Amino acid sequence: MARTKDPAVRSRLLDRAAQMLRTRQPVTLRTLVSGTGVSTMAVYTYFGGMDGLWKALRQEGFTRLAARLAVVKTSADPVRDLAALGAAYLANAVENPDLYRVMFDAGFDLEDTGAADETLHRLVRAVERAKTKDRFRNEVDPLELATQSWLIGHGLASLVATGPLPHGALAHGVPLLTALFTSAGDEPDRCRRSVERGWGRIPSGPEPLNP
């Protein structure tokens, strides 16, 4: 009779891997299970091996990002909401820098690509709302503008969370997003106020793995 898998063991191994990444420890089959109370066989049982673990860890990054973005409440100001989603994206990256790196390691497939797509679709829906409220021009492509917004957030996250720039560099997001959204048709002063409100409301969300 096959043993029932314990979700707590799976979570423990993912937490352990993330913690090792954070403290720059080499992650091998044996070092991963050390101190967890499980054997190396558990890695095969729950992930099919180390490649499966990396795939699951990458998925965990997008799962946590989705949870962080879900904290952002929809308001009457869709441009504010776009900036708030960007701020939440950056908060997630800064709190989980090593997990953030793994998220974009294309060497491992995602378990659920839809979870990653949904993070972008949240931005797309906010752009669509902004068009409905006449903040952006009708000819603006929601997917294209959402992607450009993500590129700004990803660039800042990479340079601050995993790169050389100090945390204060995140403030550059306000003029960058203001310029982007103004180019889409928003009125400059109104746009700046909306972006500042959204950028200044990085929401509280899930705790980072083993802080």
Image (tube, helix red, strand yellow):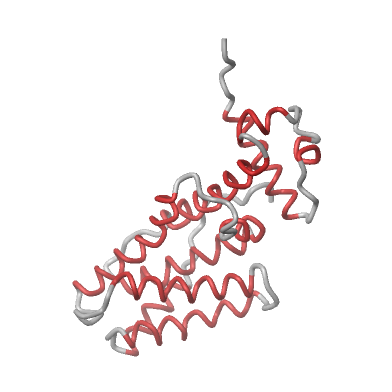
Q: Is residue 127 left or right of residue 68?
A: left
Residue 70 position by quadrant: bottom left
Quadrant where the N terminus sits is top right
Answer left or right for 140 relative to 107.
left
Residue 22 is situated, as x and y percent measured from the top left of the image, at: 73, 55
The residue positioned 48% from the left and 72% from the top of the image is 200
Residue beneath the point at 64% across and 48% down: 209
| Residue displayed at 50% across by 79% down | 173
Quadrant of the rendered image containing residue 23: bottom right
Give residue 144's position: percent from left, percent from top: 34, 74
Count of residue discs: 0
In this view, which residue lies farthest toward the front?
107
In this view, the residue in front, 60 or 132, is 60
Vertical position of residue 94 compared to residue 52: above or below: below
Using the image as rendered, state which of residue 199 and residue 15 is in the foreground. 15
Left or right of residue 123: residue 204: right
- On the image, the x and y values in percent for residue 169 come to 61, 80
- Is 184 drawn above or below residue 206 in the view shown? below
Q: Residue furthest bottom?
A: 188
Residue at the top extreme, as displayed: 1
- Say if 175 sits above or below 95 in the image: below
Percent of width and height locating residue 96: 63, 57
Q: Name which quarter of the figure residue 15 lies in.
A: top right
Q: Which residue lies at the image location 75% right of the left edge and 33% below the top edge?
A: 36
**For residue 162, above or below residue 103:** below
